[in-house]
Image: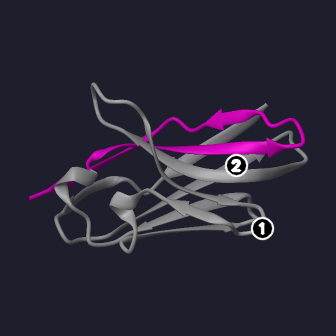
Amino acid sequence: QVQLVESGGGLVQAGGSLRLSCATSGSFFSINVMGWYRQDPGKQRELVAKITSVGSINYADSVKGRFTISRDNAKNTVYLQMNSLKPEDTAVYYCNVVVYPQGYNYWGQGTQVTVSS
């Protein structure tokens, strides 16, 4: 079993910053991809950012230049630094990992981010 524990969500004013963390534990050899997704009620879950074990990064166009994803492989933890937050960034943010070598996907429980205007 693999467990993901997220932290760092909350309420912030537009233009503010938040930092999300996701710590992974359990039985796995290593983690290939770590990422963050978000979902608004009534909408599909969408990719925010992801980072591979060798440091390759992808961002959604809507967050480029404002969000930064990073990972600490020794701690099996992924971070999302969110700056210049906008009301449209409001959503539940989910951590996702893909473990190696099986390629299994695991999700965190989600953390609410609310940006007020």
Q: Where is residue 69 in the image (x, y as percent from the top left)?
A: 54, 66
Quadrant containing the N terminus in the rendered view: top right
Query: Which amino acid type corresponds to the residue marked 2 in the rendered image?
Result: Thr
Question: Is 30 above or below relative to 43?
Answer: below
Residue occupying image coordinates x 26% and y 48%? 90
Q: Position of residue 88 (x, y in %)?
A: 21, 51
Q: Mark 1 points at which residue?
A: 54
Q: Which label belongs to residue 115?
A: none
Q: Main secondary structure of the magenta part?
A: strand
Left or right: where 45 falls relative to 22 = left
- The range drawn in magenta is 90-117
Quadrant containing the C terminus in the rendered view: bottom left
Residue 100 within the magenta-colored segment of the rendering: yes
Whole-angstrom CA distance, mark 2 to mark 1, is 18 Å
Left or right: where 36 falls relative to 66 = right
Along the polypeptide, which appears first: circle 2 or circle 1? 2
Q: Name the residue under label 2.
A: 24
Q: Where is residue 44 in the image (x, y as percent from the top left)?
A: 38, 30
Of helix, strand and loop, which one carries label 2? Answer: strand
**Could you say which is closer to the camera, residue 42 or residue 107?**
42
Residue occupying image coordinates x 30% and y 35%? 40
Q: Where is residue 77 in the image (x, y as percent from the top left)?
A: 66, 59
